[in-house]
Image (cartoon, rainbow, N blue to C red):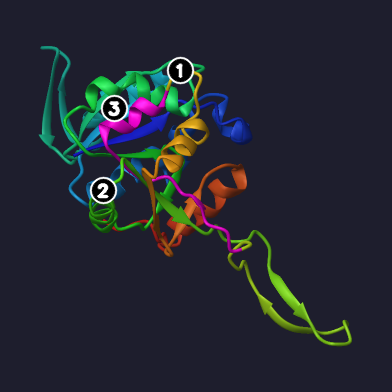
Amino acid sequence: MKAVILAGGLGTRLSEETGLKPKPMVEVGGMPILWHIMKIFSAYDINDFVICCGYKGYVIKEYFANYLLHSSDVTIDIRNNKIEIMENAAEPWRVQLIDTGANSGTGGRLRRVAQHLQDGTFFMTYGDGVADVNLHELLQFHQRQKTLATLTAVQPPGRYGAFKLSGDGDKIAHFREKPRGDGAWVNGGFFVLEPEAINYVTGDEVFWEAEPLSRLAEDNQLSAHRHEGYWQSMDTLRDRNVLDELWTKGKAPWKIW
């Protein structure tokens, strides 16, 4: 199976990092978050990727063009203009890097790579979120539902500690650090899609999260797989720092490989 990763957005809320690189190339623990996402898929033997490039897509292309060189021991014979890979530590990945336009919506990017996704069911996710989602269970759930699309539903954690005041209002009766938000389920990415789902995207400017998902739901073709484990998107510098700290301390819940 293939996994599509949407990696073309501007990442304006992470402008401290994205002035020089696309958001998926922002590093967590010294590696791009895109690498972390691909490692999650690879842990489930999904190693065939279609990456939808856009803003500064050349940075992503250059990264993978030099991936083997950077991740392996090499002998460089300058006199004879040869490079010998001595010990290959690279991933078993096949990566298609497709320019899907600088200003395309998320749905438009998917539409632009449709020709590469005609073999059957495929995964799709965003290039800025990690989770410990079980992709085998997600796929099996999708197959049982027999819908064109399945999304992973998550409950984001609250950003602040919550507490309950005592009866007189002066003492804290209960405190909980970063509880789940308001209890609402939201789109956490990590989709499983049938090729026919792409037909719900009508143009480059369309955002997948708007009309296509709404129409799929209206046609009873959208399922939700509840994920109660870890999930975190990297929308801001604060989010990046949280992820980086977890990785540095060896406590990254998404590290399932």
x then y, percent, for residue 239: 57, 49
Q: Which residues are magenta?
A: 183-201
Q: Nearer the viewer, mark 2 or mark 3?
A: 2
Q: Position of residue 70 (x, y in %)?
A: 27, 32
Mark closer to the chain start, 1 or 2: 2
Q: Quadrant of residue 18?
A: top right
At numbered mark 1, what does the secondary structure look like: helix, strand or loop?
Answer: loop
Q: Is residue 192 magenta?
A: yes
Q: Amino acid at mark 3?
A: Phe
Question: For residue 146, which numbered disc appears in the image?
Answer: 2
Side (left or right) of 188 relative to 38: right
Q: Residue at x 30, y 42 (%)?
A: 38
Mark 1–mark 2 Cα distance, whole angstroms, equals 27 Å
> Most extreme residue toward the top, as rendered?
80
The residue pinned by badge 3 equals: 64
Please identify the residue farthest to the front as the structure is shown.
Answer: 219
For the residue pair 119 and 135, the one nearer the viewer reads as 119
Disc 1 residue crowd, few under 14, some 14–19, many 20+, Cα 10 Å: some
Residue 88 image point, x, y percent: 14, 38
Does the residue at mark 1 contact the one at mark 3 (Cβ under 8 Å)? Answer: no
Disc 1 and disc 3: Cα gap in Å? 26 Å
In this rendering, position of residue 73 left or right of residue 229: left
**From the viewer's perspective, is residue 70 above or below residue 245?**
above
